[in-house]
Image (tube, coloured by chain):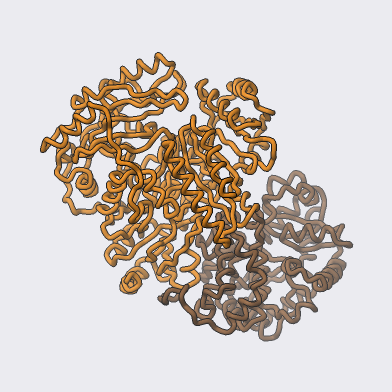
Amino acid sequence: MSLNLKSNPLKSQDFSKSAISLSRQLAFLKEESSACTRCGACLQGCLSYKTLNMENFSPRGRAQLLNLIIERKIDLKQDQEMLLKCINSCSQCGQCSQFCAIDLRIDKFIFELKSHFIKSSFRISYLKFYQKYSALLFPFFTFAKGIKQAKKKEVKSLLLTSKAGLKFASCALALLPFSRVSKQAIYLNEVIYSGNKKLINLILKELKKEIKSFKNPALFTDNIILWRFLKKQEGFEEIKFILPDLPSQKAKVSKSNICIINNNSLKENKEDDIYSCLNANFFVEFTQEMLHTPAGLFWRSLSLEEERVLSSCLKRYEGATLIALCAEDKVFYDRLKKKSKAKLNILTLAQIINEQGRAKK
Amino acid sequence: MIRNNFEKARQEISSLLEAENVFCDSISLLLNGFDGSPVKSVPQAVLNITQPDKLWPLVNLLIKYKIPYTARACATNHDGAAVPLKGGVVLNLKPLNKIEKIDTQKGIAVVQCGVINQDLQQALFEQGYFFAGDPASSPFCTIGANAALNSGGAKTLKYGSTLANIVAADLITSQGAFMHLERNFQGPDLLSLLLKSEGTLCIICRLWLKILPLPKQKITLQADFASLEHAMASVEKIIACGIVPSALEALDEIALNSPGKEASLLIELEEVSYKEKVKEICKKNGALNIISANEKEAKELWIKRKAACSALARLNKAVISLDPCVARSDLASAIKNIKQILSSYNIQAGIVFHAGDGNIHPNIVFNPSNFYTSNLINKAVKEIYKYIVSVGGSISAEHGIGIEKRAAMALMFDEKILNLMRDIKKTLDPLNLANPDKILPLATKSEKELYTSKDSAIIALQEQVKQVKTLKIEENLLSKANKIIELDKKNWLIKVQAGCQVSEVEKFLNENKMTLPIADFDGTIGKAFADGSFKTMADFVTELEFILPDGEVYNIGGKNVKNVAGYDLIRFLCGSLGVYALITGLTIRVFAKDSIKKTEPKKQGSFRAAAIHYALKKVFDKENKFNKLEDFYVFKLKKQSVEKPRL
């Protein structure tokens, strides 16, 4: 963090062009974001606040931040690093809105911010940021190993975030060229927030294809909102979800063979019917292995340059296990592994599921 | 000026805290200059405090460079106390969130100041204990802030407010001294004075909290009433029976969102045997229906109650939550009047109140961008405060004063008391660096008439104090001021002069089937209070009258059980051994006979005086007229010395 002392930012008038355009683009959120009464009830749900212990990384702070951006009260260029940190520390888990008395969707604000940054000239700095904090970028490692690795390499952001159980998927959105989103599925959850029906349908189609490639149908999500959304869709009725971290629910588990990984975000929800579709033995072993993997990400749309960045980041995670969500992902990971020349284990989810099944028999 | 000072100190601060904990970017500055109130400001830097040991050198550094500092953690307070008004630095204490020790044998938990209240409750719950400080915002407020504002909450009626449950603390005074203070230390109760100063006299570092075993059983009753008077009559009857519910809350129809019921009581009982009796009382007093909730339902009821304030925000854009407190007997009329004031200004508000202790929360919902209504609200709020003061209540029962109620302090206290408080702040923090410009009105003159006593014995005492050069304060001095002034059976309070013998008062109360919270004591009430035999007696004293060496008589407090306005002089003077003031009268809470465990006296003697004792002595007694500090202290410290921190 630079120790740059500046004049009173409220009075500063020097704004870059991008700040003005950003402010205009986000102006439609103004009414909502200024509705925050700053009561602080959201603080109890926010994992990033609990770990990073600073208002900058709290939902309340982020709502204020959005206000400040819209009102053009901050110098975007000078405080780029902090701005990106504030936004990226949000895992968009949506816990804050569950505690918010007026149902503000701060995760939605952050989604808007992220997508606008990607579009705008901030994209380059965004990428640079990820290069620096690669741990945020590439969370495809097993949990325990990841922590060990991180301690060795002193990747602070990883330690913090994984301790809090943050999900990383949304961060990866930054690397995807937004213009190509319509062709490829990205993090479905965020797309649903965007309300773009065309895009959603495309992604659903894509997902259905994905599911068919498994022997046992599988889908990946990490969010109750997404789960509810998918449940309503045609062709997704058979999909089962598995939740980690719920020892008390193990007894209720019956049979299933699919996994969905996430912690915390579903913890507080009393959706008994979700738990009833879990497979106990499978569930336990599986989640220990994959507690902190992001879900629903498709990496195939990366450009060569972005692939290069990723593979260089991978070098830091020597010995980690990458879990591919489908066969196509595995091809991509193999390619990354070759480029990075790091020792990595690559498994597909189908492999894991089948192995689990065999072990059970 | 301040910015220049910070520039000079920056190097040293960042080498002390490590550069990564010093934030000067505009985002951090703008995002750390607000709290739950509408006030905002911008500091010069935000400092993350990650180790408690660093606080002491840091505060000294800030004093050295004359940089104002404001402590801030979750900043969910409603009063603006965490806003860095003069800029300077914001100390982010949230990272100090370690529960250091839970000792169930001694009944003590040691926590750092940034621990979230509910995190502590959870940790204690696993061991079968709980901490009695339980404000509605417990899931997102820190223990340090609870102490600094003396937060109340639902359990105050039975267990007292946060301060009553704090045993000791490590703190850094605004003079830059590191102090470990305990409630049981002999001499004046410095701990309470410094802790409950909203950060204007000290920064809290670590707290030793009293923890209690969880009650074996707990039941919650919900009783709906068609009228407020009926609800209040039930509350009075319940307490008159000697039943002290662990919580006694009430919501009005807007907060309940159910028209037709004017009030709904939530009664939490730890003695299940009283359940039928309470039900009977409620029924007799016109309860429409009574629901006894099981554990799961009760939890939901309490969540609903605790979220009431923020949920009202749905009705409009913003909420201001006020927290005036009146005597319990005035509660019903106070609510009626407040409603009338609000409706006369056409302002919408939901009222939630702690029925057991007379604390009302009018939660005003409004649109802050509408200047017209904002203006109206200001007027209405002032009128409410004026009304509250006129019935002898307090403007703040648990939220604190901060900036929001600063001006209203001039309504509540007369100029003498305000000057006394100003002198305390000025002496302990001459540069006005610790959370500057909070609590005390800056220039506003008090609108309240100066307090004078009409009692001949007190007037004679005043004359005596004025005439003599030195005066030894002892119980014989008050032999003529020995009247029992009033027994308020409705509010369960007794007003006595300090010269009354404890045994006499107890006898008088026994005739009325009541009792004092303190055990038998050979001496006067004034002695029991001032010689430190009962260090926790201040928890039961709601009003105090005292004479200072200038011969003026002062009065602080009232009939309201909860009061956090200004510095806690009542607690400070408890056990002060006549060094600072001559206590002449007290109002004490009384209880139904055999319903309370009495505090046993402990013989107190000399105490260890530090620089701060001398500083405060100069505030109260410039000419050293009353008892000398030298008569009581054990070992002498140089006046200007600072105590070294225990690292």
As drawn, the residue found furthest toward the top would be B511
Query: Which residue is found at the position 44% from the left and 36% from the top?
Result: B391
As drawn, the residue found furthest toward the left would be B469
Instruction: Specify the quadrant of the image occupied by residue A219.
Output: bottom right
Q: Which of B336 and A120 is in front in this view?
A: B336
Chain painted brown:
A
Horizontal side, residue A277 vs residue B270: left or right? right
Horizontal side, residue B298 vs residue A199: left or right? left
Q: Where does residue B232 sit, x and y in percent of width and height?
A: 56, 29
Q: Nearer the viewer, residue A307 or B175?
A: B175
Horizontal side, residue B519 vs residue B608: left or right? right
Chain painted orange:
B
Image quadrant occupied by the N terminus of chain B: bottom left
Q: Nearer the viewer, residue A181 or B313?
A: B313
Q: Is residue A134 above or below residue A47?
A: below
Q: Where does residue A85 sit, x and y in percent of width and height?
A: 55, 71
Q: Is residue B515 above or below residue A79?
A: above
As drawn, the residue found furthest toward the front would be B344
Query: Which residue is found at the position 67% from the left and 71% from the top?
Result: A28
Q: Where does residue B523 sit, x and y in percent of width and height?
A: 25, 22
Horizontal side, residue B478 vs residue B248: left or right? left
Q: Which of B625 and A150 is in front in this view?
A: B625
Q: Is residue A96 above or below residue B306?
A: below
Q: Where does residue B231 sit, x and y in percent of width and height?
A: 59, 30
